[in-house]
Image: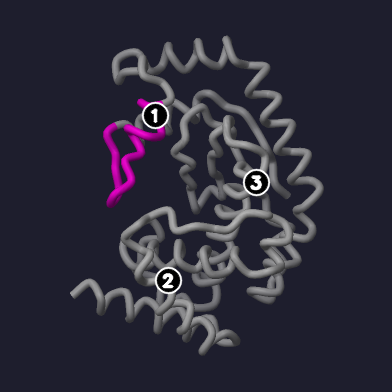
Amino acid sequence: MINISINKEFDKEVFSDFWGFSLGDVDFSKNGIEKIHPKITKQNHKKYIDDFYTDNKHAILDSRNELEHVVNKTQDAYFKAIYDVFGKDYLGRSYTCLLSIFDCNPRYVEEKRFHVFYKRDTIGKLGVVYHEILHFAFFEYAKTHCSSIVETLNPNEGSYWALSEIFNIIILNTSPFQDILKREEYVFYPMLAQHVDPIKKIFKENRTDFCTFLSASLSYLEAVKK
């Protein structure tokens, strides 16, 4: 089940996490916060967020309802496609999607919670939803079935994080997902682009053995860092 919610307190958490933060060539603070809200500061952000939610409550609620409608129409097909990838049914899990006034779109793996910028168009918001839930399925499957490979790894950094992003590019551009998303999945982090084709090759060679794919891909990503 995918729950689409609104909670301004979590947006205060997003601000704190992403203010002044960048990763590689992606500046979340500048592009995800300051560009959209040029008057927000570290000092005024709590009041700014409270006021923004009050002044724009109808637009935020409309965005939430729009997203909920399209999720309800497509989630059965999406989770069927997920089943075909992992051989497991993830439809019964509870996922929380929070509309956000910032375009940072973070995810919290253990809580199965993520944020979506409310001003994205419908397909754009849906793309974030299904991108993040694929991350959750990837990490859960790896933890359950390949624990010896990933037990010491952090899903939010390093090669494990990089692989999860590349895996999404590969999977979400296959026909079952594109029939739902209607928009190509692009490489969001430029530094990962050169590794998509090598990882795709490893995936094709180990399509029926996820743990071998995981191990070989992580080994590749570690080797190219040296």
Quadrant assignment, res 174: bottom right
Within-10-Å neighbours for mark 1: few <14, some 14–19, many 20+: many
Q: In the rendered structure, are the residues bearing label 2 and label 1 in contact, judged by CB atoms less than 8 Å apart?
A: no
| Residue at mark 2 | 196
Within-10-Å neighbours for mark 3: few <14, some 14–19, many 20+: many
CA separation in Å, label 2 and label 3: 23 Å
CA separation in Å, label 3 and label 1: 21 Å
Residue 29 screen position, x and y as percent: 33, 34
Residue 83 screen position, x and y as percent: 71, 70
| Residues drawn in magenta | 20-35
Residue at 34%, 68% in the rendered image: 159
In the image: residue 159, left or right of residue 68: left
At label 3, the amino acid type is Leu
Quadrant assignment, res 133: bottom right
Verify whether residue 30 appears in magenta. yes
Quadrant assignment, res 152: bottom left
Q: Which quarter of the rendered picture does the C terminus lie within?
A: bottom left
**Which residue is nearer to you in this view: 73 or 154?**
73
Q: Which mark is residue 126?
A: 3
SS class of the residue under badge 3? helix
Verify whether residue 101 appears in magenta. no
At label 1, the amino acid type is Ile
Residue 68 screen position, x and y as percent: 74, 38
In the image: residue 70, left or right of residue 109: right
Within-10-Å neighbours for mark 2: few <14, some 14–19, many 20+: some
Q: Which mark is residue 33?
A: 1
